[in-house]
Every structure is written in C-alpha cells, then in structure tokens.
Image (cartoon, rainbow, N blue to C red):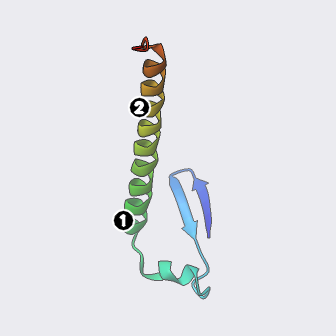
Amino acid sequence: MNVTETETGFTIEWDPDDPVESVFNTWTEQDFIDVIMKRAQEVIDNHSEQQNDEQESIQSTDQPKDD
C-alpha cells in the first residue's frame, strides 16, 4: 500500500491482486476516512491516559507519606 500526499489531499494505492491488500478493493473513500479517524481517536485516547497516569504518579510522589 502506498499513501501519497497531493495538492488536494492524499492518494491511497494498493495492489488489487495482492492476497492481503485486495481486502481494500471494495472499500469506499468513507471507509478509509472512518478507519483513519478511529485509529487517530485511539491514539489520542491512549496519549490522554498516559498523561493522566503520569500526572497521578507525580501527584502521589508529592504527597507526604502517612507513617
């Protein structure tokens, strides 16, 4: 699969005869957009969770220990 940036957006090309890539033969433009948007949201969510975990870790080390 090749993704190329153009002046108006992106072009996605694949080998329609390839046993793996041929799955895309029936995909519409919207199918590609939906998959990209879903994965982008997963990356954002994962990043947010990591940020929250790091913040909680920093806050817990700043708290005095009850002895």
Question: Is 10 placed left or right of 45 in the picture?
Answer: right
Question: Is 52 placed left or right of 15 in the picture?
Answer: left
Q: Where residue 30 is drawn, which disc sits there? A: 1
Residue at (48, 18) in percent of width and height: 61
- Towards the viewer: 61 or 25: 61
* Rendered location of residue 60, percent (x, y): 43, 21
Residue at (57, 79) in percent of width and height: 21
Q: Amino acid at mark 1?
A: Gln
**Residue at the disc numbered 2:** 52
How packed mark 2 is, by other alpha carbons closer than 10 Å (few <14, some 14-19, many 20 or more), is few
Mark 2 falls on what kind of element? helix
- Is the C terminus in the top left, top right, bottom left or bottom right quadrant? top left
* Rendered location of residue 24, percent (x, y): 49, 77
Residues at badges 2 and 1 in contact (C-beta under 8 Å)?
A: no
Q: Amino acid at mark 2?
A: Asn
Q: Quadrant of residue 18?
A: bottom right
Mark 1 falls on what kind of element? helix
Mark nearest the camera among 2 and 1 is 2
Query: In this rendering, is residue 1 above or below 19?
Result: above
